[in-house]
Amino acid sequence: MAQISSHVLDSVIGTHASGIRVECYKKASDDTGQLIFDVVASAEGRISESVDTTGSDTEFELVFHAADYYRSVQLPDDGYQILTKVVLRITLPEPGDSYHLPIMLSPHSYSVWWSGKPGTNTN
């Protein structure tokens, strides 16, 4: 089992995106998806879930529910939210590895990176 984790940071408020909903789908060859997990980030804006990586070329999709999150924190310019969801499509080439994907989020942009290196199991 691989480990997918993220630390979601709110770049507008300058804190963790506590309570943001994150879904993960395992993508099929016909581009449909099977829901693997549907979680809410901790008070520190973190998620961490184990996933089955059966099928070496399988893609996964992480869906961060940005609009719902920003509605919940009631930003003054709530009507100007243009990102409804941030979708990251990734592969997990090493079945036992950990894949940490921190994301900095705002209503109009995001930045994401992979914090790790191949062959390094941080579990």
Image: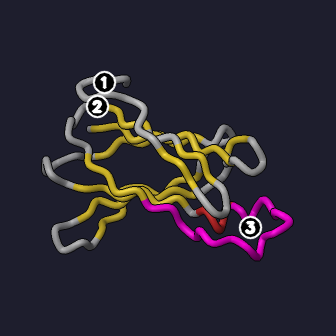
Quadrant where the image shows the C terminus: top left
Q: Residues within 10 Å of mark 3 (few under 14, many from 20)?
A: some
Structural distance between the alpha carbons of marks 3 and 2: 35 Å
Marked residue nearer the N-terminal end (2 or 1): 2
Secondary structure type for disc 1: loop
Quadrant where the image shows the N terminus: top left
Q: Residue 73 appears at what percent x and percent y?
A: 78, 59
Say if mark 2 contacts mark 1, CB within 8 Å.
Answer: yes
Residue position marked by numbered label 1 in the rendering: 121
In the rendered structure, the answer to whether residue 3 lies left or right of residue 32 reads right
Marked residue nearer the N-terminal end (1 or 3): 3
Secondary structure type for disc 2: loop
Report the residue at 37% width, 23% height from top: 122
Structural distance between the alpha carbons of marks 2 and 1: 4 Å
Using the image, determine if residue 5 lies above or below residue 33.
above
Write the start and end of the magenta stretch as one range. Answer: 70-87
